[in-house]
Amino acid sequence: MTSLLDAEALQTIGHLELLSRTVVDGLLSGKHRSTTKGGCSEFAQHRQYAPGDEIRQIDWQVYARNDRYFIKQFEEETNLHAMVAVDTSGSMSFGMSTDRKIDYAKKTAACLTRLLLRQRDAVGLMMLDEAHPSFVPPRQNAAHLRAILSVLQSATAEGGGDLDVMIRHGITRLQRRGLFVLLSDCFDHEDELATALKIVRARGHDVIVMHVLAPEEITFDFRRFSAFADLEIAGRRLHLDPPAVRAEYLRQIGDFLRRIEAMVIGLGGDYVRLVTDRDIGDTLAWFLRNRNAAISDRGGSGGGLGGGTR
Amino acid sequence: MSFLSVAFLFALPLIAAPLALHLFDRRRKVEIQWGAMAFLVAATNQKTSSRRFKQWLLLLMRMLAIAALVFALARPLVPGGWLGGNDREELIVIVDNSMSMSRSHDGGTFIELARDRAIDEVAQLNPNDRVRMMTSAPYPVWNQTSGLRGGTAGSEQIAAEIATIDATLGRSDLLAAVMRASSSQSAPLTTRRRILVLTDGQSGDLRLDDTVGWERLRNRVEQASLPTQISISPLTSRTSSNPVASSTRGNVAVDRVSANRMLVGVDHPVSFTATIHNHAAGGVTDLSVQWHVGDHDPGENDASSSIHQQTIDALDADQTETVRLQHAFPDPGVYRITCGLNADDDLIADNRSSVVVEVVDEIPILIVEGQSQLSSSQQDSFFVRAALGWLDNQQPVAGSVHVPTIISTEDLTRHRLDPYRCVVIPNLIDLEDAAIESLRQFVFDGGGLWVALGPRTNVDRFNTHVFAGGELSPLAVDAIVDDIADDASATDQAAAEPVRIDPFGQAHPATAVLSDHERLDLGDVAVQRRFRFAGNDHNANTAVLLSLTNGQALAVETMHGRGRVITQAIPLHLSWSDLATSEAFVVMVRDWVDYLAQPKSTRFNLEPGDPVVFQSEADGPTEARLRTPSGEVIELTADTVFGKAIFRTNRTRLPGSYEMELGLSQGTLPFEVARDPAESDLSPLSDSKWSALASLAGLRSVGTQQTLSSQPQTDPLWPWLLLGLIALMAGDLILSGFLARERFGTSEVAAVPTQPMLSGSLGDLPRSRSGSRAAS
């Protein structure tokens, strides 16, 4: 079970944090901005004093400058409810020179879970399997890691299914706004997938699409006449001379990747391409550093490990 | 269509090799479980249809290339003109100008028919075609060095060339002519060659016995780079389309005239023999034979100018009759004696034949006497001199052409031998080395040597110096054998009979008269003792003139250089045998001396191709003209060798009478080149022989006539196939390159980025974990 936890990857990303780009609903105080304004610690705004307000909340320095009473309001820092969704369609079982995509996705999900739990965030798991859907609600305790890893371990990639339907069905079970991480090759209907992700985004979730691809799928460096068997539709085969169609194939998949990326970014989410011949730790570290930097730049507070909303 | 190497067609199944390899390669495909199938389907729909067409086109081109190669190796031939294009033909007309072509038929001669036919053939040629003429008798000879243009452009010149062709007295070798024509260099840009043989179909000219030669011709024609067609067509008469079957009036010919000696003395009778042969299928009667001396018009075999006339009462079919003439010439000179025949037959040219004899005042002879110190009657040369009519060095009253000079053995070294025609050694004793060397040179230059071995002959020295490996004697001698003693020891009385000379032992020109045992007593000559020749290893130049009744050789002959040497195992006097006292001895001495003297004489009777060599005195003319039977005049210039002028030429290929004019006042010298009597046989080829010839030469009958022709004109197809092969290979390369460019592209396909740049991100992209490994 612990084989899913790549020690080297965990060491690489151990000092990093996965922060929410948007505000989330958390029960505990933590590193993420809360939807509840209170006097906890993070200054939010000034409000004109009204009768009934606590006198100690008056900002006396403002009164000294303006001769008016203003109440000093603070944002509450709370913990994150993150949901990791893993696509288990048949196409995710592809893997030739590297690990299968499903295995790569599982490892990535395990590392993210471990990372989030370490920063005391609640993590849930959603296996997007049409035949055997699994849903692990977000929990924050350390023992929850074992439950998630168990589900990941037992998951297999087979069959087809509509990815968008499964996403829309699973997202309704999230009560609080949080972080939605999709690990998939996205080989589904683009429009329906975009709709599903829009719904997720509309419900206030921060969206991260981790696009899992095998190197063969983006290089298509086959030389010999071959028969390509569909992993999702049994008995479907295509006999062809790979070099003859390589250029056209690369053009098609290149366009597809660009469209997916544009769609995710257009939703306000983050898009990261996970190629299975690359080290998980390096890729996640690269992603987390860039994401944190982006959040820091947008928040103007200098970024750092805590993000820009504190 | 035909093929020269049909065996290569067995490789035709190789055409399927590209298809089989293609299918086999497809069967070896690997199966890949693939996820991104939607993009693959989309890409395939864009590319497959056009690419599949190109692939099948490439496959087809490769199959066609193999087919072209296989067919090219099989060397196919297609009917002439099938491929079109510029067709330039070379026509070679071989005219049989042998003697038989001069026979008359239907108001003309066959050589006239051949000329007319040649003109007709040339008239049918195109202006671009070339024509060459060749005559075949007695050897194939081109009438001009280069081809003439066909059509009207060269018609006049060709007609003039054809008009010069006339029948000769020679015999044709049509096989050699066709062989030479087929192997000759053709004119540039010639595409095919046609060889037309115009002949009377006489069986002898076609040399059917030379099967190897005809097969070689067949192979040469089949493998010729230039397509060659051979047509052998017997000439037809003007009024009939059928070849002339045979002579209609028959043909009686004087096959040959010969003389018993070519060098005779003045007033000495010489015997001439003419062989008359009836070549016709039926008999003839009342043939008149006339003998003429000197120049004589061949058309006039009249009796008025003849020196002798004879009559042959009847001559059956294929019968040979000989007539003889004995004649003595009163003055020295060179005479042509002609035997003519008055016969109304098809071929007039062979109704006469000639021979040339040289009449001289004297024939100088050198006799080497080993016992000159003895009286004349005791000398070894006594009987030889007596046989020649010279006794006591006095010229006989009746005159003798043989003039002997007698020297001692010791003087032989110092004596010049050049003036003599023959050297006789009646009883050989030891000769000095210088003398032997002088004799060897004398014989090499054409002199004759007659060596008789006797009691004083040193066997070892003879074998070492005279025999010397066969130079001056064909055989070494072993020892003296006593035939009487051997026989006496036998108990059988019959075996004790003395050994005698066998008069019928050998047929040799020198013993032709000696063999007349009815008039001569050569068979009565007993030999008591003799030298025995060692071994029987006669070489090719060895001939036995006389042999004994026990089979042993008594006189043998060899050739050394131009001269002749006779070695005799008994001396020319009374020792060991009674030959010297026989009547035949006189005839033998004179005949053999004449025989030995001949090589040093000018050869006036020649075979075709033999050189004319005439030697005149130093103060004689240095220019001469030789007139050939065809009327051609050959200018000759003498080579001066050791003070003597020698005229020499090899241009004697035509049989017939030649005349050499020496200066203005020297008169003319006749030369006679013999013709082949077989040419008088006018019988044509039978149907079976035509079939045999067709089989030998790979020819086939054309039409109903007895015409043979090689395969119809064909053009080689393989150059075009090779060109097609080159084009297909070029197309294959181009299409393969095109497909390869489609498969792999001319530049690197823009790779899909493995990681997009997040907005605002500045970090480095993570590196590949294991590099890019090829999927398969």
Image (cartoon, coloured by chain):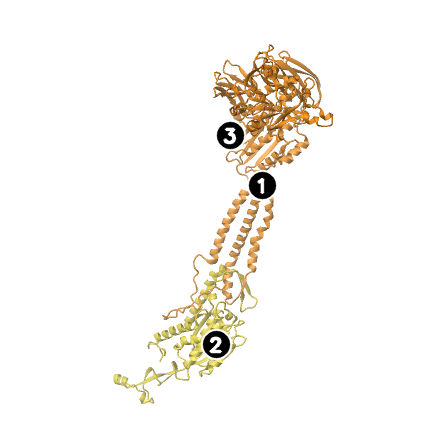
Q: Would you place residue A271 above or below residue B661 in this image?
A: below
* Mark 1: secondary structure: strand
Hey, what amino acid is under mark 3? Ser
Query: Percent x, y for residue B516?
Result: 68, 19
> CB of mark 3 within 8 Å of CB of mark 1?
no
| Same chain shared by disc 3 and disc 1 | yes
Q: Nearer the viewer, mark 3 or mark 1?
A: 3
Whether residue B298 is visible: no
Query: Percent x, y for residue B514?
Result: 65, 20
Query: Percent x, y for residue A145?
Result: 46, 81
State the separation of the CA atoms marked 3 and 2.
100 Å
The chain carrying label 1 is B
**In the rendering, what colour is chain A?**
yellow
Q: Which chain is orange?
A: B
* Mark 2: secondary structure: helix
State the separation of the CA atoms marked 3 and 1.
29 Å
Whichever of labels 3 and 1 marks the residue nearer the N terminus, that label is 1
* Mark 3: secondary structure: loop
Q: Image quarter for residue B598?
A: top right
User: Pointer 1: what residue?
Assistant: B77
The chain carrying label 3 is B
Q: Nearer the viewer, mark 1 or mark 2?
A: 2
Hey, what amino acid is under mark 1? Leu
User: Pointer 3: what residue?
Assistant: B146
Residue drawn 49% across and 81% down? Answer: A147
Numbered mark located on residue B731 in the image: none
Mark 1: few, some, or many residues within 10 Å (few <14, many ≥20)?
some
User: Pointer 2: what residue?
Assistant: A3
Hey, what amino acid is under mark 2? Ser
Q: Is residue B260 left or right of residue B129?
A: right
Mark 2: few, some, or many residues within 10 Å (few <14, many ≥20)?
few
